[in-house]
């Protein structure tokens, strides 16, 4: 649903763990995280944490700023 994104230069690695911040700037084309698109561009951050084992990603967890998405996609939000 979100097609454009860029990696923020904030990447931290320690041992077999890597954390990074992804900043999305996009126009959703269909429902996204339970929100209906309104045709407007939105931007939000996602913080992703990777755990590697034997050179491969073994686990991924992420935190997404849902409040920022909701504020931008809510139908009654005035811009």
Image (cartoon, rainbow, N blue to C red):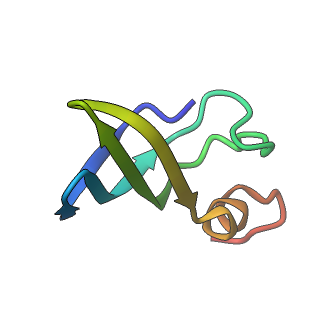
Quarter of the image where the C terminus is located = bottom right
Closer to us: 14 or 19: 14
Q: Position of residue 21 (x, y in %)?
A: 33, 61
Nearest the eye: 18 or 31: 18
Q: Give the residue drawn at x 61%, y 68%.
A: 68
Task: Describe residue 15's horizontal placement relative to residue 79 as left or right.
Answer: left
Q: What percent of the width, then of the height, locates residue 12?
A: 20, 65
- 54 up-or-down from 25: above or below: above
Q: Is residue 21 left or right of residue 15?
A: right
Q: Position of residue 34 (x, y in %)?
A: 80, 43
Looking at the image, residue 72 sits to the left or right of residue 51; the answer is right
Q: Hey, which residue is sitting farthest front in the picture?
A: 54
Q: How many marks?
A: 0
The quarter of the rendered structure image containing the N terminus is: top right
Relative horizontal placement of residue 60, taking residue 1 as reference (left or right): left
Residue drawn 24% across and 30% down?
54
Residue positioned 58% across, 36% down in the render: 28
Residue 31 spot, x, y in % from top left? 74, 33
Q: Is residue 16 above or below residue 52?
A: below
């Amino acid at each position: 649903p979100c097609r454009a994104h860029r990696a923020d230069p904030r990447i931290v690695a320690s041992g077999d763990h890597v954390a990074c911040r992804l900043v999305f700037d996009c126009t959703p084309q269909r429902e996204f995280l339970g929100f209906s698109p309104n045709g407007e561009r939105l931007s939000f951050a996602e913080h992703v944490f990777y755990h590697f084992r034997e050179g491969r990603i073994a686990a991924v967890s992420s935190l997404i700023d849902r409040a920022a998405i909701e504020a931008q996609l809510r139908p009654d939000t005035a811009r």
